[in-house]
Image (spheres, rainbow, N blue to C red):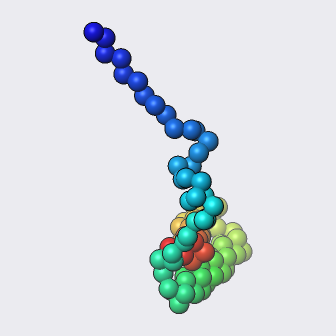
Amino acid sequence: MSNIHTAYFSDLNSNGLSDEEQEIGEVCIANISPFERKLRVQFAIRQFVTTLIILGAMIALHLDPLWRLFLFFLFAASTVSYIQARDKT
């Protein structure tokens, strides 16, 4: 008696949805309210402008370019807030 294990794989080009589900389309339910999205966009814009002002000051004061690495976190906070507002998460 041989133990043969067989694995069956689905179609690799399929996304796992039936034909009916694909025709209906995706439904996105917002995770945050429109007011909260507005606040996040406003925060993203304020954070981005503030970071640009700080970057300009650093360049004008001829600070060591390594200090500019700290601005990454400010740019990242701005980007994350904007993406969250756009994706409604």
Q: Is residue 54 visible?
A: no
- Taking the image as shown, residue 47 lies to the left or right of residue 60, namely left
Q: Could you say which quadrant of the image residue 46 lies in?
A: bottom right
The picture places residue 17, in percent across and down from the top left corner, at 54, 53
**Residue found at x 53% / y 90%:** 35
Q: Identify whether 15 is placed above or below 84.
A: above
The picture places residue 61, in percent across and down from the top left corner, at 68, 74
Q: In front here: 50 or 68?
A: 50
Q: Identify whether 2 is placed above or below 34.
A: above
The picture places residue 23, in percent across and down from the top left corner, at 63, 61
Q: Could you say which quadrant of the image residue 2 lies in?
A: top left
- Taking the image as shown, residue 60 lies to the left or right of residue 27, namely right
**Residue found at x 56% / y 49%:** 15
Q: Identify whether 10 is placed above or below 58.
A: above
Residue farthest along the bottom direction in this orientation: 35
Q: In front here: 64 or 5?
A: 5
Q: Quadrant of the N terminus?
A: top left
**Residue found at x 58% / y 38%:** 12
**Residue found at x 60% / y 65%:** 24
- Taking the image as shown, residue 59 lies to the left or right of residue 30, namely right
Q: In front here: 75 or 32?
A: 32
Q: In front here: 77 or 61?
A: 77
Total count of labels: 0
The picture places residue 7, in percent across and down from the top left corner, at 42, 28
